[in-house]
Amino acid sequence: LQKQVKKIDYVFKIVLIGDSAVGKSQLLARFSRDEFNVDSKATIGVEFQTKTLDIDHKTVKAQVWDTAGQERYLFSFTHFPYRAVTSAYYRGALGALLVYDITKRESFDHMARWLSELREHAGDSIVVMLIGNKSDLGSLRAVSTEDAKEFAQSQNVFFMETSALEATNVEPAFVSVLTEIYRIVS
Ligand code: GDP
Ligand code: MG
């Protein structure tokens, strides 16, 4: 069988950030392979996943970086030598998914610090989407949609609630960020 090779028009790097266990790796697994691994550790060690999709009749390759458990290094940006790791992770990123867990208030309270770290390294023009993940766990909710919307507006970033488990809003979240990047660079 001959495989059709499609010309790639754009490659956009996107980074996933947020506290450990909020569901970043599962969001990536859902987006790139339409999978959800009950044993999350299976995805450790992969630096990034790619997915190619069409945006405005162009072929866009999303290169999505996942932290593979280095969150505490990224988050401790004042501590040498982790700055180098942090810089490499953010370098060249055009978009970011800033992820918290709707059942973990602390993960939402950390968003401001993640955002300032992101902007320090990736610049102010990076496209950012705030993501409240695990929307399937509504009965355990600790962060209201209103609070998150308000925060997103105050920071001038997009916002969506997702469930990697139920595949709710995952593709739309990534596609929104990619489309906005495309709008800016094209
Ligand atoms: P990471 O540390 O941010 O990469 O988080 P993981 O993707 O490893 O997920 C952490 C835990 O949350 C795992 O037990 C996942 O199965 C679970 N998880 C991730 N996304 C969801 C979701 O949308 N809904 C629910 N209920 N659990 C999720
Ligand atoms: Mg992970």
Image: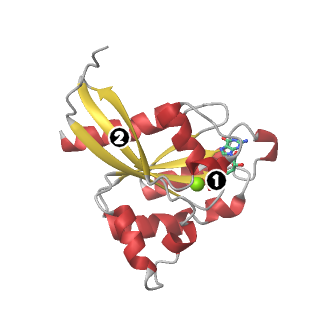
Mark 1, ligand 1, within 8 Å: the answer is: yes
Instruction: Find residue 9 and report its horizontal and vertical position in percent.
Output: 19, 34
Per the rendering, the mark at residue 62 is 2
> As drawn, which residue projects farthest toward the right?
139
Whichever of callouts 1 and 2 sits on the residue coming sooner in the sequence is 1
Disc 2 element: strand
Instruction: Find residue 118 and report its horizontal and vertical position in percent.
Output: 41, 64
C-alpha distance separating marks 1 and 2 = 21 Å
Disc 1 element: loop
**Closer to viewer: mark 1 or mark 2:** 2
Residue 147 visible in this rendered orientation of the protein: no
Q: Nearer the viewer, residue 41 or 165?
A: 41
Residue matched to label 1: 22
Residue 20 visible in this rendered orientation of the protein: yes
Q: Which of 58 and 169 is in front in this view?
A: 58
Q: In which quarter of the image is the C terminus?
A: top left
Query: To which quarter of the image does residue 36 belong?
Result: top right
Residue at 44% of width from left, 86% of height from top?
Answer: 80
Residue at 23% of width from left, 25% of height from top?
Answer: 6
Residue at 74% of width from left, 51% of height from top?
Answer: 103
Per the rendering, the mark at residue 175 is none
Q: Nearer the viewer, residue 5 or 171?
A: 5
Instruction: Find residue 111 and report its horizontal and vertical position in percent.
Output: 55, 62
Residue at 48% of width from left, 52% of height from top?
Answer: 46
Left or right: residue 22 versus residue 8 is: right
Q: In which quarter of the image is the N terminus?
A: top left
Which amino acid type corresponds to the residue marked 2 in the rendered image? Ala
